[in-house]
Amino acid sequence: MAAVSCSSLSLAQQANTVLQPVNFDQVIINDDFWKPKMDNVATKTLAACIYQTEEKTPRIRNFERVANGKGEPHEGIFYDDSDVFKALEAMAYALKVKPDAAMEAKADEWIDKVAAAQLPDGYLNTWYTLKGLDQRWTDMSMHEDYNGGHMIEAGVAYYQATGKRKLLDVCIKWADHFDSLFGPGKRHWVTGHQELELALVKLYTVTNNKKYLQLADWLLSERGHGYAKGYTWTDWKDTAYAQDVLPVKQQTEITGHAVRAMYMYTGAADVAAHTGDTAYMRAMRRVWEDVVYRNMYITGGIGSSGGNEGFSVDYDLPNEQAYCETCASVGMVFWNQRMNAMTGSSEYMDVLERVLYNGALDGLSLSGDRFFYGNPLASDGRHYRREWFGTACCPANIARLVASLGNYVYAHTASDLYVNLFVGSSTKVRLNNIAVDIAQTTGYPWNGLIQLTINPEKAGNFGLRIRIPGWVSQQAVPGNLYSMKPTVTNYVLKLNGQPVSYTLQDGYAVIQRKWQKGDQLTLELPMEVQLLTSRSEVKQNEGRVAIQRGPLVYCVEGADNNGKAWDFVVPANTSFSTMPHQVLQEKVTAISMQVPALQIAGNGLQVQTGSKQVLAIPYYVWANRGKNEMQVWLPTSFQNIKINR
């Protein structure tokens, strides 16, 4: 079957999608903030993933054992195959960011081993192939579909990045095997860990074979009818854990495991975008509002409970105990991009930006080879970044997100270009049948100056839509879960150095005109220090404020403050100043404040108040200098202070 590059899909094939995101393979990132991180992922992070996958753990060996056919046992966990595929997907993106012959050879080597483990009927899963094929497809909780979905995502990405289709053909054969067993008039199947739904839509976009889109739609329709069989349902007896209480189109609130939910709702939005199914669209909006309006941290992190790695009750957002799995933040990026594409509304990109710069990026160390599984918003000094995890979904997941940043910067329709993220980059799109080169330069997120150079192949009319972040107008997040103190500054938009006429639509500044080669549009965003408060229902943040500047949420870490991050308050009249600072090799803008503090006498029997200079740093860089105290939500009076000893 001939495959077609996703980036070359016509808008006719995407007829129900309001926006078409520009694919990563069509975007060159040269950003001062993101490019070093992407290079770090391409070298340090993927080197760690390869070492752990090949040497420290048996993940690759399991594929080799299947191919050897000598009856060797399986080692590890039943979902370990997925980590191989996520690492391969990250390699694919990295090869576009930083071409590397050795990396490509390593990926090809892995792909050969994966292909050699595929059975003649298309089945591919090392757990059941080594342990007993008689048990395959009997327990919906055992991640066979999840592993297959991540393989499809890797196969599509590697094909788009390199043009090589060996893994893609393996994926097609696997998907055809799955389709031969499950679907209308065949066997029921409820995905135990959602992922296959969104992957099948990706497979549809590169093959244009509608059966994969229809299969994704069918998988979504299987939920909420009592069809599921597996330990999640029979042992745990928790259908909400896997979002299986109601059919997807009837769901109104977020439940259960956060990563499962994000992958499922991403898949539902993908299906809705391609089919125009308004029932999915309405359900996605209802659930999205429940997440963002009542269940999201200020960092964009989601899933407060470690017990189910997910959601508990509305407004339950503890800080020290926050689970906030890195993978859930990655899923929030996926879902919000799809919601933006489906609607053309910038509020989804506002959430995506918040998650990307804070909740997700925090999961990756500055060195690139240490990781957070959970991302708390306060620490008494016990939290630290780890080399790896037994369940190792997060390292490869954050690697593939950072490496694929190009997927999220631009989108377009037939006649309009959307600038969604402020990232130094370039791309080319066709607008009103005119090839248009766009180059973006910026110092974001440290300063708010963004410059776009537009070079159409010939003068022509088309629209340019630039997202104006909600925080510019003091909307911290959509809804009113968090609030910002009103200020009077605003953004400035100029064309070729002169004020330009524009309209504001769905959160975008829209300039519709006849563009000439060399036109330069500049946007200057105010980068003031802003204080945020929570709704009163969030009891953990009562009497506390958080600090934000631009898209970045700040925290106070002991490493910058003589080991203390819990002994001060931030009154309403506090003034702030910014200053250049460095956390290891990372140059950041820090925020300084002179605030009241408690001082405990050496004998521990006396307490007095004084004043101290406190330095706040971007949240994403904390815990890179060893174990430290840390707080995001800072007390405004001594009544709410906690002395951490």
Image (spheres, grey):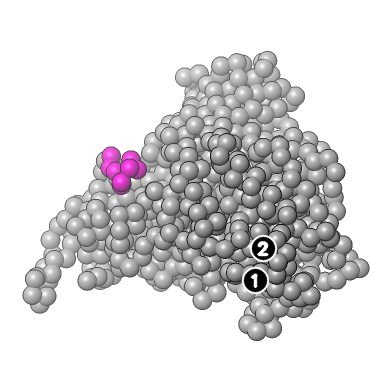
State whether the magenta stretch is mostly helix, strand or loop: strand
Q: Which quadrant of the view contains residue 86?
A: bottom right
Q: Residue at x 51, y 67 (%)?
A: 390
Visible residue check, residue 255: no
Which residue bears the numbered disc 1? 73
The three-letter amino acid code for the residue at tag 2 is Arg
Q: Is residue 195 left or right of residue 299?
A: right
Task: Say if the magenta span includes residue 585.
Answer: yes
**Side (left or right) of 136 relative to 308:** right
Residues at discs 1 and 2 in contact (Cβ within 8 Å): yes
Q: Is residue 133 visible?
A: yes
Q: From mark 1 to mark 2, how far is it between C-alphas?
A: 8 Å
The residue under the point 40% across, 67% down is: 319
Closer to us: 354 or 572 = 354
Question: 72 or 368: nearer the eye?
Answer: 72
Q: Mark 1 or mark 2, which has the lower sequence index?
A: 2
Report x, y in % for residue 417.
Answer: 64, 32
Residue 197 locus on image (x, y percent): 73, 59
Residue at 48% x, 20% y is 498
Residue 39 part of the magenta segment? no
Report the residue at 36% width, 62% height from top.
384
Residue range (magenta): 580-588
Label 1 environment density (alpha carbons within 10 Å; few <14, some 14–19, many ≥20):
some
| Image spot of residue 378 (x, y percent) | 35, 64
| Residue that badge 2 annotates | 65
Question: In this orientation, which residue lies closer to the viewer: 77 or 503?
Answer: 77
Please tell me whether mark 2 sits on a helix, a strand or a loop. Answer: helix
Which quarter of the rendering shows the N terminus? top right
For residue 586, which numbered disc appears in the image?
A: none
Whether residue 256 is situated above or below residue 50 in the rendered picture: below
